[in-house]
Image (cartoon, rainbow, N blue to C red):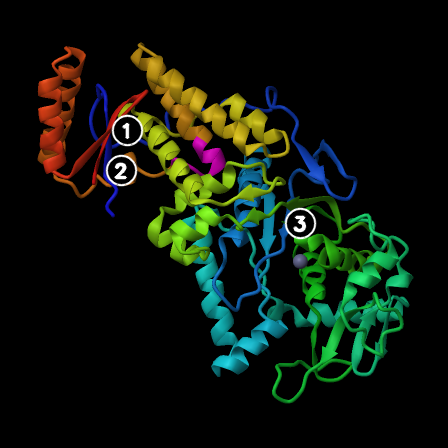
């Protein structure tokens, strides 16, 4: 279904906006509220300050690449992208090192390869590429680094050897296992006690484990499984090891922020901490641990209306990526979000309203992010509040009479949108008008304007006649608070 919308209102200059940078960035350091982030380790929201402001480090656990990404998989990339943008504004674009890994060796990948007969690298390269495309369609900046597990086997072997030497790991039956009882702080992140974790560890406990909670650092590979030579024979790493080794290799022993979905707290992040802390003489792995909540996909409404479409590459055929991004940002990242058809419809309408302002008023890029938006984001990335702030600015822009004031507010809107990774498309593109001949647009604009005038003059007969004419042209008109929007039916 083509989406063609135009906001009718008096237009100050037609067409494209001028994205020239003409407004100097306001120095935000003095006015900006301190960034507070919720840290899972302490269970509190506290002021974030990097260990070294000239090298701010963030690691987010990335996908295991053997199938299409589910929309729920996009919540971490989008949430941490908003944080990445904020950190870059605060400390400088090149000062922030954001790493997100690709797990390209995993038993699920091996299974997929054995089922399809395709080589593992064919599968992982294909789905890594699709994942990157999905994240780009959703408006995410590329992380600074995207390390792959298979390219870090050596540091993983080295870390395992160090852990054995320090008495934190042991070799048994071709495996190397981390000894959880050797690490007194095991379970500190998720506030769990050892018995809980043992119960949750694995359904069946392998006989070679000294403790049911011990986890695999290295395991043997059969002849048909991929493997690498190691001091413990040909094998492959356990899943948790890669993140510890890649964090160490690229970011250092203690990083500023480690992020991921809340399902990763246990066992993945507990195990990462155990490996990293014990191989780094007790240095903490991260100064802040951030975890995002889940998408609630159980809604009946969703399954009826969308036939259960949950894969990003399918959703993006029906919805612009920006609508999906907006929808993900409507809830605070730590809160659950119910993913419904109406959420997507509402998100599309919200973006129409915001882009409508940008289409009517020429915005300039380079404005500082408005304080209300910055303050909302500084409060543990409160994106719903930041979105409300954008609407407040849009409302002001609509009410402003002075043209300079309107332009300033539109520029604020554009800058506030950028902080969230929104509103950066050309408004004409957003409304699908780029390919519509100008004469056709003018003609429809004129009809809608005449209809509004007729309504205002209470000439309902004429207004209805024009509406019928528009309907015959397959044009639908929505009358909103900011004026009338028309779109093709
Ligand atoms: Zn990880």
Above or below: residue 228 compared with residue 79: below
What residue span does the magenta drawing correspond to? 417-423
Q: Which mark is residue 431?
A: 2
Which image quadrant for residue 402? top left
Q: Which residue corresponds to mark 3?
A: 262
Q: Quadrant location of ligand 1? A: bottom right
Label 3: which secondary element = helix
Task: Give the residue drawn at x 81%, y 73%.
Answer: 205
Dots 2 and 1: beta carbons under 8 Å? yes
In the rendered structure, the answer to whether residue 167 lies left or right of residue 216 reads right
Q: Which residue is mark 1?
A: 359
From mark 3 to mark 2, how far is it between C-alphas? Answer: 37 Å
Q: Nearer the viewer, residue 9 or 466?
A: 466
* Residue depicted at x 70% and y 35%: 49
CA separation in Å, label 2 and label 1: 9 Å
Find numbered disc 2 in the image and state the secondary structure of the residue it sits on: loop
Q: Residue at x 46, y 44 (%)?
A: 340
**Going from the N terminus, do you reach mark 1 or mark 3 first?**
3
């Amino acid at each position: 279904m083509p989406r063609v919308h135009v906001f009718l209102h008096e237009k100050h200059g037609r067409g494209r906006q001028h994205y020239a940078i003409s407004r100097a960035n306001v120095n935000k350091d003095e006015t900006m509220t301190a960034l507070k982030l919720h840290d899972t380790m302490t269970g509190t929201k506290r002021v974030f300050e990097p260990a070294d402001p000239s090298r701010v480090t963030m690691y987010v656990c990335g996908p295991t690449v053997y199938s299409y990404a589910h929309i729920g998989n996009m919540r971490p990339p989008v949430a941490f992208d908003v944080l990445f943008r904020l950190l870059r504004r605060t400390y400088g674009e090149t000062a922030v090192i954001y790493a997100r890994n690709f797990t390209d060796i995993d038993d699920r990948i091996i299974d997929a390869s054995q089922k399809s007969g395709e080589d593992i690298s064919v599968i992982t390269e294909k789905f890594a590429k699709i994942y990157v495309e999905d994240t780009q369609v959703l408006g995410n900046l590329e992380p600074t680094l995207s390390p792959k597990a298979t390219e870090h086997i050596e540091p993983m072997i080295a870390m395992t050897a160090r852990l054995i030497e320090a008495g934190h790991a042991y070799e048994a039956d071709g495996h190397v296992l981390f000894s959880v009882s050797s690490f007194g702080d095991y379970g500190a992140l998720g506030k769990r006690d050892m018995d809980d974790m043992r119960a949750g560890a694995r359904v069946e406990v392998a006989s070679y484990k000294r403790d049911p909670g011990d986890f695999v650092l290295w395991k043997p590979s059969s002849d048909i499984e991929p493997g690498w030579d190691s001091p413990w024979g040909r094998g492959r790493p356990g899943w948790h090891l890669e993140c510890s080794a890649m964090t160490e290799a690229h970011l250092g022993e203690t990083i500023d922020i480690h992020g991921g979905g809340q399902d990763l707290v246990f066992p993945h992040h507990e195990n990462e901490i155990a490996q990293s802390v014990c191989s780094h003489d007790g240095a903490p792995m991260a100064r802040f641990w951030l975890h995002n909540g889940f998408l609630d996909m159980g809604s009946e409404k969703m399954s009826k209306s969308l036939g259960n479409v949950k894969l990003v590459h399918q959703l993006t055929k029906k919805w612009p990526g920006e609508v999906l991004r907006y929808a993900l940002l409507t809830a605070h990242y730590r809160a659950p979000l119910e993913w419904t058809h109406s959420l997507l419809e509402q998100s599309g309408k919200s973006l129409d309203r915001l882009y409508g302002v940008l289409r009517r008023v020429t915005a300039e890029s380079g404005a500082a992010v408005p304080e209300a938006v910055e303050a909302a984001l500084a409060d543990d990335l409160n994106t719903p509040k930041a979105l409300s702030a954008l609407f407040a600015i849009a409302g002001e822009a609509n009410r402003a009479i002075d043209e300079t004031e309107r332009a300033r507010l539109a520029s604020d809107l554009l800058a506030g949108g950028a902080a969230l990774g929104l509103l950066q498309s050309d408004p004409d593109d957003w409304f699908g008008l780029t390919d519509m001949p100008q004469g056709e647009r003018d003609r429809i604009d004129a009809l809608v304007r005449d209809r509004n005038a007729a309504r205002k003059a209470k000439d309902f007969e004429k207004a209805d006649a024009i509406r019928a004419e528009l309907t015959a042209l397959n044009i639908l008109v929505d009358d909103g608070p900011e004026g009338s929007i028309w779109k093709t039916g």
